[in-house]
Amino acid sequence: MIMEYMDVYDKDRQLTGKIHRRGTPWRRGEYGLVVCVWVYDGHGRLLLTRRAPEKSFSGTWENSGGAAQAGETSRQAMARELLEETGIRAEPEEFELIATDRDRTCHYDFYCLKRDVPVEEVVLQPGETDGVRWATFPQVHELIGEGKICKIIADQFQKQEPILLTKK
């Protein structure tokens, strides 16, 4: 298994100059950076991937995202994560920042990206994702109601839906 390292930020999102080994506990007052993207097709649909059986929340649908690696900007991390998880290539400047947040260990950046990609062209990452689909906003709500989108992603969607609706 390859060791991954993340930059350490303070509560105000200032780099501390330290790095953190992924998978180890965070010290109090230290934060990582996580990025997520809602890919939308311009016709009212969002691209969702399904978490592979070996992942936590297996079988649930989500948007693409993950942890920024040491030395990466938020947008660079987003471009890398999207490419790794879906095979969709985008330049860092193409991602539109729509929201930020922070919890007890991470800062979060939420992006949207307009791409109309046929699902047949999406390349899933073994061990990460095992399904892909386009879903309308009502279908996303249906998936949430059925418990097929984990609570963390569902909460993100419900907070960001008003912004995403302007992207249609």
Image (cartoon, helix red, strand yellow):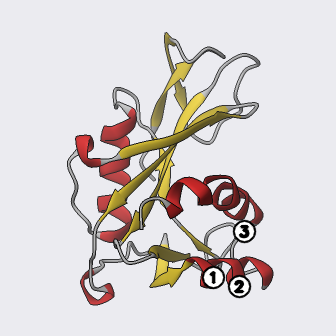
Q: CA distance from mark 3 to mark 1?
A: 16 Å
Q: Position of residue 147 (x, y in %)?
A: 78, 79
Q: Which mark is residue 138?
A: 1
Residue at the image position 27 percent from the left and 85 percent from the top? 118
Answer yes or no: is residue 49 visible.
Answer: yes
Identify the mark nearer the N-term, 3 or 1: 1
Q: Is 90 located above or below residue 102 in the figure?
A: below
Residue at the image position 63 percent from the left and 82 percent from the top? 138
The residue that mark 3 highlights is: 150
Q: CA distance from mark 1 to mark 2?
A: 6 Å
Instruction: Say which of marks 3 and 1 sits in front.
Output: 1
Instruction: State if disc 2 and disc 1 touch (CB < 8 Å).
Output: yes
The residue that mark 2 highlights is: 142
Tell me where residue 51 sits by quadrant. bottom right
Q: CA distance from mark 2 to mark 3?
A: 13 Å
Query: Between 17 and 107, which is closer to the camera in this rendering?
Result: 107
Instruction: State if disc 3 and disc 2 touch (CB < 8 Å).
Output: no
Q: From the viewer's perspective, tell me whether residue 60 is left or right of residue 28.
A: left
Q: Which mark is residue 95?
A: none
Q: How dense is the environment of label 3, judged by Cα within 10 Å: few (below 14), some, or many (20 and up)?
A: some
Q: How dense is the environment of label 2, judged by Cα within 10 Å: few (below 14), some, or many (20 and up)?
A: some
Identify the mark nearer the N-term, 2 or 3: 2
The kind of residue on which mark 1 rests is Pro
Tell me where residue 60 sits by quadrant. bottom right
- Describe the element under mark 1 as helix, strand or loop: helix
Tell me where residue 114 sits by quadrant. bottom left
Instruction: Say which of marks 1 and 2 sits in front.
Output: 1
The kind of residue on which mark 2 rests is Glu
Residue at the image position 61 percent from the left and 85 percent from the top? 139
The kind of residue on which mark 3 rests is Cys
Q: Quadrant of the C terminus?
A: bottom left
Q: Position of residue 34 (x, y in %)?
A: 53, 41
